[in-house]
Image (cartoon, rainbow, N blue to C red):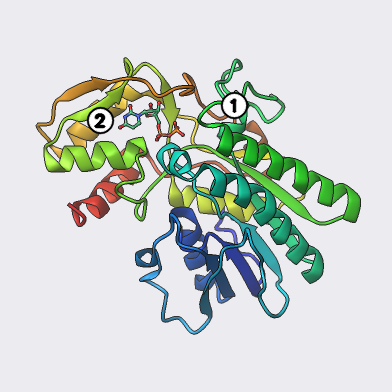
Amino acid sequence: MSERKVPTGRYLVTGGAGFIGSHLCEKLLQSGSQVVAVDNLITGNLRNLKNFENNPKFELIRQDITGRLEILGNFDGIFHLASPASPVDYAEFPIETLRVGSYGSEHVLEMAKKSKCRVLVASTSEIYGDPQQHPQKESYWGNVNSIGPRSCYDESKRFLEALTMAYHRVFGLQTRIIRIFNTYGPRMRENDGRVVPNFCMQALRGESITIYGEGKQTRSFCYVSDLVEGILATFLGDSHLPINLGNPTEFTIADFAKKIIALTGSRSELVHKPLPEDDPQLRCPDITKARTELNWEPKVPIDEGLAKTIEYFRQLV
Ligand code: UDP
């Protein structure tokens, strides 16, 4: 499996100052492309752009794409990643989350139509809700509570998928849909409330590690460089149908806490807090499709990815 390279050109990345968006921008710049990132910094961070902000081929436009998306010139490809994405963030910004998945996505798809370019949109494993099939295949329709606290994100991403398919069917737009499962790595916000930053920061500070519920719920964690490789593979691939991107190695949250304690050498203790409402009990991607259609699978072992992530969080303590 060799590294994917998109043809050199001008690319738009929405949410380019976010965790995954900034890694994607960096990768596109490394292969010589021009990159325009658009972000309103609601959950993105200028700190994420440090490595490449002075690259003359990079431009950040601070714009809220839910109101308008006005950028001069055409693009050779668009990656639509803009959205609050952690349960704590979208609980704080539910309306903004719904707006970026709907109005924001429409503006992005219109931009792709105008540029006559391929567009990849970021959906999520959350569209499977609290799944009754395990592991989750792309063919599973999900089990989502449409009025629960996570519905602002789940439904906005389900709408994004529907809108993208409609643009594909009506206008013949070249669309790609990825369903991103839990991803981790440097540039995650230390206070975004997700399990990786929470456990790492708590362990590094010697604070108690907060396990929600009994910790029997499962997740699987994909290192960000693997995910970016999967994004490029999907963009270059042939299918307009959704594709799961994630790492299929599954952990219970309690075991994951012990792993973080071991890797940080922390003396933190485990404490239990109430399980958030509608927290999915099981989550693990079936990545057969990505393996067979894209020849993609994650390569970075969890201990290696976590070591790099912990090193990043150590600077923030
Ligand atoms: N979690 C936890 N302690 C924390 C943060 C999260 O036990 O401090 C659990 C959470 O209940 C969920 C899992 O870890 O079951 C992953 O949560 P996260 O917020 O990272 O994202 P999700 O996968 O739920 O979107």
What crowding class fits label 1: few (fewer than 14 Cα within 10 Å), some (14-19), or many (20 or more)? few
Residue type at numbered disc 1? Ile
Q: Is residue 266 above or below residue 300?
A: above
Answer with left or right where residue 39 lies relative to residue 75.
left
Tally the numbered discs: 2
Q: Position of residue 94 (x, y in %)?
A: 52, 42
SS for dot 2: helix
Q: SS of the residue at dot 1? A: loop
Q: Residue 266 lies in what quarter of the image?
A: top left
Q: Residues within 10 Å of mark 2 (few under 14, many from 20)?
A: some
* Residue lying at 51% horizontally and 27% vertically, measured from the top left: 284
Q: Position of residue 67 (x, y in %)?
A: 64, 62
Q: Which residue is mark 2?
A: 259
Give the side of residue 44 with respect to residue 166, left or right: left
Q: Is residue 303 above or below residue 277?
A: below
Badge 2 or badge 1: first in the primary sequence: 1
Front position among marks 2 and 1: 1
Residue 48, picture quadrant: bottom left
The three-letter code of the residue at mark 2 reads Lys
Q: Which of these two is toward me, 210 or 68?
A: 68
Residue 147's disc is: 1
In the rendered view, does 59 fall on the left or right side of 71?
left
Q: Is residue 240 visible?
A: no
Callout 2 touching callout 1 (CB < 8 Å) = no
Residue 267 visible? The answer is yes
Residue situated in front as seen by the camera: 166 or 78: 166
Distance from the alpha carbon under mark 2 to that under mark 1: 35 Å
Q: In the image shown, does 183 or 232 lie closer to the viewer?
A: 183
View quadrant of ligand 1: top left
